[in-house]
Image: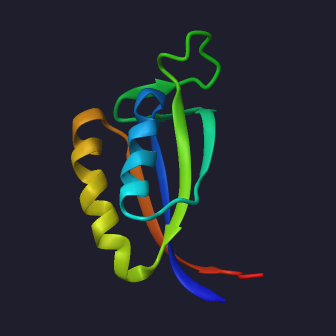
Amino acid sequence: MKPVCRIEIVIDALHSEKVVELLADLGILGYTLIRSVSGSGERGDRRGDDITGVSNNHYILTTCPPEQLEAVTDALRPLLERVGGVCLTSDARWLQH
């Protein structure tokens, strides 16, 4: 198994494309995006079933090599400070097949 850093991002749906672009700029092309997630945080409750999609959040899951994590978080921080959202990181092991 290969050691990696797991990166989980919850962000307003309107800004998820920007997150994907930031990741791609850093060479991270693989990710999973789950649309319309529900939850509650510092900006209040978010429902995943809003008809207009204006207040929907997206969940993005990706990984990077441990030595790249600081570059990823440095790139994401300004966006998250501006628009809100959550970024969690943890150590993980990738079962390569």
- The one nearer the camera, 49 or 53, is 53
Q: Is residue 12 placed above or below 28 in the rendered structure?
A: above
Kindly give the residue lying farthest to the top in the view shown.
52
Q: What residue is shown at x 60% (from left), y 87% (from top)?
A: 2
Q: What residue is shown at x 56% (from left), y 10% (from top)?
A: 52
Q: Is residue 35 placed above or below 20 in the rendered structure?
A: above
- The one nearer the camera, 24 or 54, is 24
Left or right for 42, reference 9: left
**Can you tell which quarter of the image residue 82 is in?**
top left
Quarter the C terminus occupies? bottom right
Q: How many marks?
A: 0
- The one nearer the camera, 92 or 47, is 92
Place of residue 87 in the rendered image (x, y in percent of width and height, measured from the top left): 40, 54
Quarter the N terminus occupies? bottom right
Q: What residue is shown at x 41% (from left), y 81% (from top)?
A: 66
Place of residue 83 in the rendered image (x, y in percent of width and height, measured from the top left): 29, 33
Kindly give the residue lying farthest to the right in the view shown.
97
Q: Is residue 91 placed above or below 54 in the rendered structure?
A: below
**Can you tell which quarter of the image residue 95 is in?**
bottom right
**Can you tell which quarter of the image residue 12 is in?**
top left
Q: Is residue 18 placed above or below 9 in the rendered structure?
A: above
Place of residue 61 in the rendered image (x, y in percent of width and height, measured from the top left): 56, 55
Place of residue 6 in the rendered image (x, y in percent of width and height, measured from the top left): 52, 68
Q: How is the image coloured?
A: rainbow
